[in-house]
Structure formats: structure tokens, C-alpha cells
Image (spheres, helix red, strand yellow):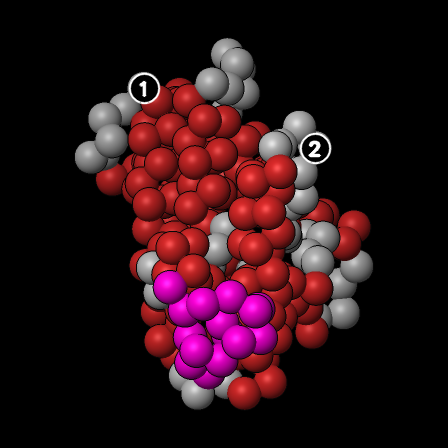
Amino acid sequence: MLVHMESGLGLRERKKQKTHETIIRVALELFAEQGYERTTIAEIAEAAEVSPRTIFSYFPSKEDIVFYDLGELHARLAVALRERPEGVTALDVLREFIVVSLTPDRTHKLRRCIVATDEGLQRGKRARFAPLERLLVEAIAQDLQARPEDIRPQIVAASLIAAFTAIHDPEAELQPYSQEQALAVIDDVLSFLRGGLEALRQR
């Protein structure tokens, strides 16, 4: 989702935000039309009416354009897990992130289609989710009062990442589920994991 944050920003910051969003929008459109590998930085720059150097000042690589929001997601999740009130579990925090992902905008839908057709991007996506999994391992270990290297938090975190990536799967939007039905499924999965975590705590 392209987040508009122009309110309260100065003119220079607003222009930078607009340029950032324009690069993402035109790049994803070109990737969808021409294919990710066949689209060049020069073509993106021309369509966005900026120089290739400007694009690289915002994004180190083409892949970083596709996954433009995952760094921010990692940062927000880290803060939410670190600052969660007493009694709020890692599962509760992750649920809020999944709820947001159930209402993708056109940008997210384009990305799903682009990633679905490129094996390199699929590998890149899995690699970029690895830091999220490490965050969850640490948070779940805290919930269990266990060490991060304990195998139990790792297994639960892997299950959570599998659920999260399934929501972002390119094929997910082809399934005949409404948003309410999808959320009900997610809640069933999280309820199952909560039961397992509670059993681990009691042990």
C-alpha cells in the first residue's frame, strides 16, 4: 500500500514522497506489462520522468522497488512487538498486521501478479521474510519465557510466517473467500497456535 504522508511535511519532503510513490507505481505497471526481467531501470526512469541516478537514490535495485514496503513492515513489527503491553502476545500483534494485508490496494495486487511470474522474486520474497521470522522467534520466546535458540519458538514462528505468506500468495486472491471468511480462517489458525503456546507454557 502506498502510504500518503504529505500532511505536516515541508515542500521538499512532499516532493520526495511524491517521487518515491511515482517510481513505485510506474515500475510495477511496467513490470506487469513487460515482465520484471525485461524492464530496465532506464525505462522506469523515463516513465517516471526522473533520471536513473534518482531511482538508485531511492532504491538500490529493481527488487527493492518490488518489495518497497517490507523494510517499513519489519520496523513497525519490531516496534509493535517490543512495545506491546503486558498480556498482549506476539500472536495478537501479528494478527493486526494480517488484518491490514487482507485489504490490498491495486499496488499490492500488481505486486502479487509480478512475483507470481518470477522465480527470482519469489526467492527474494522468502529471503526478505527471514528477518520477520527472527523477530517473531524472539517475541514468542519471551512469551514462553524461553531462550530464542529454543526449538519451540522457532517452530511456532515458522508456522506464523507460513500463514502470513499464504495471505500474500499470488494465488490467494483467486480463492472464493470474502475478507470476513479469510479473517475467520486466520483466527482459526491463531486460536490453534494459542492453544499450543498455552500448553507449552504449562509444561
Question: Would you call the spot at circle 2 few (<14 residues within 10 Å), some (14-19), or many (20 or more)?
Answer: few
Q: CA distance from mark 1 to mark 2?
A: 42 Å
Identify the mark nearer the N-term, 1 or 2.
2
Using the image as rendered, state which of residue 81 and residue 194 is in the foreground.
81
| Element assignment for label 1 | loop
139 left or right of 30 in image: left
- Residue 37 seen in this snapshot: yes
Residue 130 vertical position relative to residue 126 in the rendered view, above or below: above
Q: Amino acid at mark 2?
A: Ser
Would residue 121 be counted in the magenta stretch? no
Q: Quadrant of the C terminus?
A: top left
Measuring from the top left, give residue 40's x and y in whole percent.
42, 80
- Circle 2: element type: loop
Residue drawn at the location 45% of the way across and 67% of the way down: 51
Residue 147: give x, y in percent of width and height.
23, 26
The answer to whether 175 appears left or right of 194 in the picture is: right
Residue 104 left/right relative to 28? right
**Residue pictured at 57% horizontal, 55% vertical:** 19
Q: Is residue 45 magenta?
A: yes
Q: Nearer the viewer, residue 179 or 43?
A: 43
Q: Position of residue 155 (x, y in %)?
A: 34, 45
> In the image, what residue type sits under mark 1?
Gln
Q: Main secondary structure of the magenta part?
A: helix
User: Residue 152 lies in what quarter of the image?
Assistant: top left
- Mark 1 or mark 2, which is nearer to you? 2
Classed neighbour count for the residue bearing mark 1: other residues with Cα under 10 Å, few (<14), some (14–19), many (≥20): few
Instruction: Identify the residue shown where x is 24% and y is 31%.
Output: 148
> Residue 145 has which mark?
1
Residue corresponding to mark 2: 7
Q: Which residues are magenta?
A: 39-53
